[in-house]
Image (cartoon, rainbow, N blue to C red):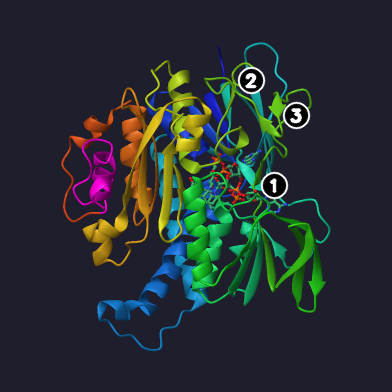
Amino acid sequence: MEGQFDLMVIGAGPGGYVAAIKAAKLGLRTAVVENREIGGTCLNRGCIPAKAMIHASSLYREIQNSSEFGIFVSNVTYDYGKILEYKEETTKQLVQGIEQLLKANGVTVLKGTGTLLLASGEEREVRVASEEGEENYKTADVLLASGSKPLKIPIPGMDLPGVVTSDELFQMKEPPKSMVIIGGGVISVEFATVYAALGSQVTILEAMPRIVPNMDKEISQNLKMILKKRGIEIHTSASVQAVEQDGDGYRCRYIEKEKEQEATGDLVLCAVGRRANTEGLFAEGAVPEMERGRVTVDADFQTSIPHVYAIGDLIGGAQLAHAASAQGIAVAEHLAGRERSVNVNIVPGCVYTDPEIASAGMTEEEAKEQGISVETGKFIMSANGKSLITKEERGFIKVVADKETKRLLGAQMMCARATDMIGEFVTAITNQMTVSQLLKGMRAHPTYNEGIGEALEELEDGAIHVVPKKKR
Ligand code: FAD
Ligand code: NAD
């Protein structure tokens, strides 16, 4: 089939740019269309800037607590402008790196809005529109990777100037003195951690009975306790009805336990999830099947339109950067006739609070719901040497294994460096390893990683640094 490109990718976020680079590496003539900055939400308005803010604010809190380690520092202050500069510099460096990688791999970058056109026969057509005009391109296959945008709930007051989403929060020149966050999910708890550390009074209003409701129950409960200790006010089962102006600030009216309540703040952050970004993506007659606003795909990420694929936040499932990238690699390999190199089904979920939270595979509850007989091994990090050294002993590692086969099914962790350590479990679950197989490798001392060994040992003969139940 003739065409200008083998693959045209619409959207250069972690889904699109990774797919484009991989496709080019596998010999496909590839173009990527982007109407904002290369790197998408993740690099410009998501993961990277959020983690930079988390790093800076955690450092500020750590310095304030340094006397625990015999270090005395006086007059500790921060300059929010400089924190923003550091955040922007980090983002810029990464974006430039991706731009260079696209170029070095021979990917054509087309600046503008990409629209899938109604095409006849096998060939696909994409229109790219920018200030310079419009141009149509022919391609064998199209990959839709247009990502997502913040969602605002349809209640009165959401268009008030002080009601923002994460996009606008990143642009604020000063931290708010007080803020109310609607939603107690991942964005909420991460930003609550940042702004509470910087001195803001934070209130979280979550509609579900617990914060981070997608995580293990024990993690939700522990996190709530930790955040409350840091002065964050948390209301669960709180359904927000309206936001109103209150002098220079804002009042959120919500119902908790059938009673009308109010929470006030200088700023309201709406963090109730994200919706797929399909604005300008489809020409008339070229709309693939969708479910609840997200494009539906088959196991190869093909949409209902042949030769049109979709990945990342645009489709159903976890809205995470690494999931989008893994799906992008899978599509590139499929188009190049290669065997899939990555398991797209075991998706680690991480929350960058302090302590960090990470999970992969099934929780004990999920396994039980599926009728799988499981056993769990748990290690409390207060018995881990490295955690005691750094005074990060709060937390635990929980491992879920199939009772009969001893295969690892899942892990949930809340401890220092949990987001780095979860990789070990992802590898083990993906490769269907058993508890004893994952225990075989020696773990260095002193490391947080030793906690994983101990949690696994609890499923064998008992962990060395845990008092046996019968002798307690
Ligand atoms: P996106 O990153 O949204 O990229 C899509 C790109 O397509 C955008 O650049 C957009 O401008 C472009 N585009 C859209 N339509 C068109 C069009 N028609 N033509 C041309 N271009 C178009 N995930 C994690 O895994 N870890 C984290 O720590 C994390 N932290 C986050 C923190 C925040 C505050 C937020 C908001 C999100 C966070 N996420 C995190 C989620 C992560 O950012 C997304 O899951 C990820 O960016 C999705 O990648 P994507 O490629 O599907 O889409
Ligand atoms: P989320 O789905 O994690 O949380 C939204 C929360 O808002 C839920 O707990 C939900 O119950 C609650 N909610 C919904 N409607 C509400 C209402 N009317 N009143 C009160 N609460 C309400 O979504 P998010 O925190 O906005 O994050 C968006 C996406 O970005 C997520 O899918 C997440 O995966 C991704 N993200 C990931 C990370 C990370 O990996 N560390 C960090 C930030 C964001």
Q: Horizontal placement of 300 versus 70: left or right?
A: right
Q: Which circle, 2 or 1, is nearer the viewer? A: 2
Q: Amino acid at mark 2?
A: Arg
Residue 228, how many percent across, how many down?
53, 67
Q: Amino acid at mark 3?
A: Ala
Name which of mark 2 and mark 1 comes first in the sequence. Answer: 2
Q: CA distance from mark 1 to mark 3?
A: 19 Å
Residue 429, how many percent across, how many down?
35, 31
First to last magenta residue range: 448-472
Are circles 3 and 2 on residues that touch, CB within 8 Å? no
Residue that carries the numbered disc 3 in the rendered image = 283
The residue at 15%/42% (across/down) is 442
Q: Which mark is residue 131?
A: 1
| Depth order, front residue of 134/47 | 47
Q: Amino acid at mark 1?
A: Glu
**Helix, strand or loop status at disc 1:** loop
In the picture as drawn, the residue positioned furthest to the bottom comes out as 75
Name which of mark 3 and mark 2 comes first in the sequence. Answer: 2
Q: Is residue 462 rendered magenta in the image?
A: yes
Quadrant housing the N terminus: top right
